[in-house]
């Protein structure tokens, strides 16, 4: 189903109000499920969330963004911190936070002397740095995804 039609359908079924603006995909989004742009009232969604999540979870993300949209149009509190937003989100069963779909890459290094493991996001120059516990030489072990 096309994104625009899906958003319009969710808006009518779950809010009883029409969605009169544009819904688009935004490939630059990584950890966010969607965005609401108050300037022109369009919604942008993460295509990766659509691919990796179930249709129920993606529908909850659409509901979240539609909460922003409809509250803004009604001139009520549409920010995450506002009571109006929290109340409407609970009523329509929208997701408060987007689930993690991208796993973060970590590098694991181990001291040759004491065996202590160091888990880092950034790569370490093993010729330049030593173990903080015993000053032993570090060796690269593996990449770990969390």
Image: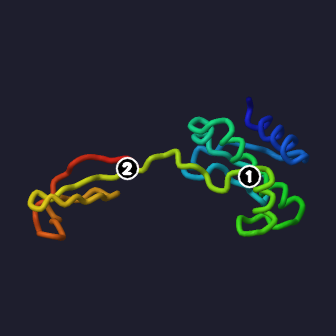
Tell me where residue 72 appears, x and y as whole percent: 83, 61
Mark 2 burial class by Cα count in 10 Å: few <14, some 14-19, many 20+: few
Mark 1 burial class by Cα count in 10 Å: few <14, some 14-19, many 20+: many
Identify the element where label 1 is drawn.
helix
Tell me where residue 102 appears, x and y as whole percent: 49, 46
Residue shown at 67% from the left, 36% from the top:
55
* Residues at marks 2 and 1, CA–CA distance in whole angstroms: 29 Å
Residue corresponding to mark 1: 65
Query: Which quadrant of the view contains residue 54?
Result: top right
Residue corresponding to mark 2: 105
| Image mark count | 2
Residue shown at 33% from the left, 47% from the top:
144
Comparing 131 with 35, the one in front is 131
- For this view, does 93 lie left or right of residue 127? right
- For this view, does 79 lie left or right of residue 145? right
- For this view, does 124 lie left or right of residue 46? left
Residue shown at 86% from the left, 48% from the top:
15
Residue shown at 75% from the left, 50% from the top:
93
In this picture, is 31 found above or below 13?
Answer: below
Tell me where residue 140 appears, x and y as whole percent: 20, 51
Discs 2, 1 touching: Cβ within 8 Å? no
In this picture, is 97 found above or below 83?
Answer: above
Query: Which quadrant of the view contains residue 70?
Result: bottom right
């Amino acid at each position: 189903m096309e994104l625009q039609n899906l958003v319009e359908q969710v808006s009518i079924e779950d809010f009883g109000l029409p969605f009169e603006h544009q819904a688009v995909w935004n490939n630059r989004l990584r950890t966010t499920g969607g965005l609401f742009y108050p300037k022109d009232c369009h919604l942008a969604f993460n295509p990766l969330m659509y691919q990796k999540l179930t249709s129920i979870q993606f529908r909850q993300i659409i509901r979240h963004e539609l909460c922003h949209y409809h509250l803004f149009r009604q001139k009520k509190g549409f920010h995450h911190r506002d009571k109006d937003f929290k109340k409407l989100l609970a009523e329509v069963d929208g997701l408060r936070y987007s689930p993690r779909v991208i796993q973060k890459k970590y590098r694991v290094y181990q001291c040759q002397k004491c065996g202590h493991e160091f888990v880092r996001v950034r790569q370490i120059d093993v010729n330049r740095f030593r173990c903080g516990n015993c000053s032993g030489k570090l060796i690269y072990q593996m990449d770990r995804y969390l």
